[in-house]
Amino acid sequence: MTPNSDAPKMPRGGAFVLEPTPAECVLIPENLSAEARLIAKTAEEFMRRDVLPVADRIEANDYALMESLVRKAGTLGLLAGHVPERYGGLGLPISTLTLMAEMLATNPAFAVSAGVHSGVATLPLVYFGTEAQKQKYLPKLASGELIGAFALSEANAGSDALSAQTKAILDADGTHYLLNGTKMWITNGGFADLFTIFAKVDGTEFTAFLVERNTPGLILDREEHKMGLHGSSTRRLTLENARVPIDNVLGEIGKGHRPALCALNLGRLHIGTTALGMAKTAMNLAVRYAKDRQQFGKPIAEFPLIQQKIAMMAVDVALMESMIYRTAGYLDAAFAAIETETPDTLRAASEEYAIECAIVKFHCTEKASEIIDEALQIHGGYGYSEEFPIAQLYRDIRVFRIFEGTNEINRLTAADQLVRRVHNGQITMPDNIRHGIVLPLLKRYSDLSQEERFNTQETAADLAYHAAQRYAGQSLSLRFEILSLAPDSLLELIMGVFSGERVAAGREIAAKILTTH
């Protein structure tokens, strides 16, 4: 990549909380390129022509149909966005992929199947694969000839993924690793051709492996009976001395967290974007129903309470959209600034805005849940009927607050990363905030009872840095307790920033708390 010297200097990840952001650094959807809009139109037409007409079959768990749709999407280039052009991909900007993800979200089951393939199942290979691995697999992943899956979670290793128990032992000949263990919740498990599987070499060194479907010892269990996302194949994967060539180690032995986390960061932005697409779909369904539904001699859309619900949906959608595309623009700039592509430079770019990606994930999935719930409410009793599409959206959105890191974990990630970056000097905390607000609040906070501390959550964003410093030597559980106070209050500050207000609004809240408690 050749850095653009004329591009504005972007803020560091998380800096917008404490530092002003120039307007030219903020991407809005209206400023996306004609190429981005053309690709998004291709995705929209594919969904309207090929996916939505068979939505009933997808909902009836037709996994063969889903496989064929994912492969067809590959022939149209809809799976090739993350893959560099030299390996048969399109090498698209994150912002273009974000707009495309919105279009695919009109059918969440398909969106998740395609998104896992082109995102977390392909990105680790793009960033960390050897040249031989990339030549062998990436062209086929880009075209849909191969479908990918990502196998990280286990029965006892979900949020704490690094506690995985799956083991990899080098065989006597030194040519293969023998993998043993069980992986859970494998999206695309029923038809994936290539699995990115994480295991511990010799039971200690967390490592990523590329495992082909026909590998001896790789066993796929039955389909999970899920509440939602029907048609998206989800299976358990069992490994019984699965023989994986040593050439299929992905990245470095003992550093499997790198391909896992870099993929998850961008995956969280993708999940938030899919939630945005679902929220827009729900809002449109609610508006259409409210205009058609007659009560007391007129459409219910004319009643103020219904109008209020729709208005709040529109506000939340606008804020979600602003958060998502701003973050996508930041990431575009981070990747464009790379002079030489290496695993380290690609990983650094993908992780630079981990705070923003975590916030997008937990905020947008929760707001989408609220919007879909209100859309169902507008439908009244019909909304509870499976004959109306809002019921399916209501079921499908629920898992979005769980996968790609639970929302609780993402809250901790946002707070923990902010603390680290202020501590390391990556983000500057102005003296007037530190001395005028943070230190007085910290003193007051230290004098509060346990119950009172939980009643002052709004102050936690300002307290996080100093609180973490004070409790740095304490137990992990206490550290999590302190950090858990920060994200929602941090979000209040962030929402002010994204809606055009400045951080001063958040400081006013803190000042009020200081005077009222």
Image: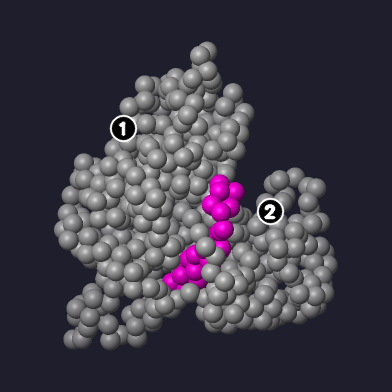
Mark 1 or mark 2: whose residue is earlier in sequence = 1
- Taking the spot 33% from the left edge, 52% from the top edge, the residue there is 79
SS of the residue at dot 2? helix
| Residue 9 covered by magenta stretch | no
Percent across and percent down for residue 287 are: 28, 77
Q: Which residue is mark 1?
A: 222
Percent across and percent down for residue 426 are: 71, 63
Residue 174 visible in image: yes
**Badge 1 amino acid:** Arg
- Taking the spot 76% from the left edge, 60% from the top edge, the residue there is 423
| Residue 339 covered by magenta stretch | yes
Q: Which residues are magenta?
A: 321-345
Q: Specify the farthest residue to the top.
A: 172
In space, the residues marked 1 and 2 are separated at their CA atoms by: 39 Å
Q: Viewer-nearest of labels 1 and 2?
A: 1
Q: Main secondary structure of the magenta part?
A: helix
- Taking the spot 19% from the left edge, 78% from the top edge, the residue there is 292
Along the viewing direction, whichever of 486 and 199 lies nearer the viewer? 199
Q: Which residue is mark 2?
A: 481
How packed mark 1 is, by other alpha carbons closer than 10 Å (few <14, some 14-19, many 20 or more), is: few
